[in-house]
Amino acid sequence: MTDFDPLAYITMIMETFYPIGADPTGGVTRLGYSEVEDEMHAAATAIAEAEGYVIETDPVGNLYFSLAPSDEYYLVASHLDSVKNGGRFDGIIGVASGMLLLKMVKEEGSDLPVKVGIFRCEESTNFMKATLASSLITGKFNESDFTALTARDGRTLKEIFEQRGHSLELNQIQGVKEYLELHIEQGRMLEANNQRIGVVTSIAGNNRLKVHLEGLAEHSGATPMIIRQDALCAAAEIVLAVEKIAKDDPMRTSVGTVGVLEITPGSMNVIPGGVDMAIDLRDGDNARIAHMRTEVEAAIGQICEARSIQADVRLVSSSPAVTLDQNVIRGLVKATEQFKVPFQEMPSGAGHDAMNFADLCPTGMVFIPCAGGISHNPEESADYADAVLGTRIMLKYLAEIA
Ligand code: GLV
Ligand code: MN
Ligand code: MN
Ligand code: MN
């Protein structure tokens, strides 16, 4: 590698993505299977074209770059979509890292078979289903999910796939020898412990519930308090019940969040007649997720009965918690030790495309610190030098096992 500068290269990639989907008040909105996500994929493709890479797409719109066609390859992947008004690092830095790793392989003149993968719709924002496209290609998706999943704009996933020309057949990805993903930690642990690298040991699973509460929208001045069926008051109790149920976990690993609350009709002088809410329950232990779900459903039943509110509760998506491959963890630890930087092994509380590969092939993840642990927020930030370090670690590991 003569005058190749990895830090300048990854900076160039990140800055190419920077303006796409920018929100006027800061942050970015790049929803899965939207035109903005298409723009992100086009920007990545332009860089890959300039490098002369082999560029492939699969029937659900995922994108792959490699130096040469190969039946078996190491897949280094992440995503370019974001949550609503999110940051510029979640997913993006993993793609930039994969592209840097491929560039390093090219500069070295190595024949290491590496493919960069860019998966559509990792975030649950658009469909309430996370890691959507990587689920599709790894056998984690049922035909019925196509009709069950609906985008924020009201179109079903099936309609969107038909309009975009994606296949409704469920295609399994072939030839992946191992899967690696670099990601920002999205928590405060690495920063608090002054570590530069996290080697991920497990990924928490989730259950996502959609709840519709139906009360009675009436005059806010003329309706006495004792006869009201206020759906928002029931929702308020449910929000606090979710918090309590997650907090009561003796292991302190469970988390529960109500991140969506939509009030109908939404007028100051009308009692809220309807509420739609989304509940996200996560833990590294599948039994704990199941326990939380049972408790949350029971709480919703009690709260709504006491207030004469009709509740419709549906599980819209779920992912089991996964343990990452012990050999990959050991290999990444060994590679990290050679760089003589502080690091630790750690679980991931967030979901990642990696979770869909863990049962198909040896799978590992590398975390880098993010400023203040802040993520899914316009303030999200990380050090490009840490991403270069994480990329070097993954490349060293791959060179070791190849
Ligand atoms: C996705 O980033 C998630 O873990 O919610
Ligand atoms: Mn995310
Ligand atoms: Mn992500
Ligand atoms: Mn994620």
Image: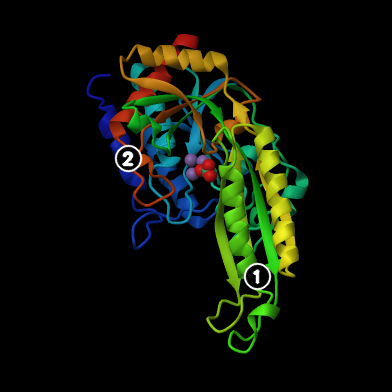
Q: Element at badge 1?
A: helix
Q: Is residue 22 above or below residue 337?
A: below
Q: Position of residue 213 (x, y in %)?
A: 69, 66
The colour scheme applied to this rendered structure is rainbow
Instruction: Find out whether the residues at labels 2 and 1 contact each other: C-beta distance under 8 Å.
Output: no
According to the image, label 2 marks what residue? 371
According to the image, label 1 marks what residue? 231
The amino acid beneath tag 2 is Ala
Dividing the picture into quarters, in which one does residue 157 lie? bottom right
- Can residue 153 be spotted in the picture? no
The amino acid beneath tag 1 is Ala
Q: Position of residue 112 (x, y in %)?
A: 46, 16
Q: Position of residue 271 (x, y in %)?
A: 61, 79
- Can residue 231 be spotted in the picture? yes
Residue farthest bottom in this picture:
222
**Left/right of residue 392 with respect to residue 347 in the rendered view:** left
Name the one closer to the observer, 178 or 123. Answer: 123
Q: Element at badge 2?
A: helix
Name the one closer to the observer, 275 or 55. Answer: 275
- CB at mark 2 closer than 8 A to ligand 2? no
Residue in the picture at 42% in, 11% down: 334
Q: Earlier in the sequence, mark 2 or mark 1?
A: 1
Dividing the picture into quarters, in which one does residue 235 lie? bottom right
Name the one closer to the observer, 396 or 377. Answer: 377
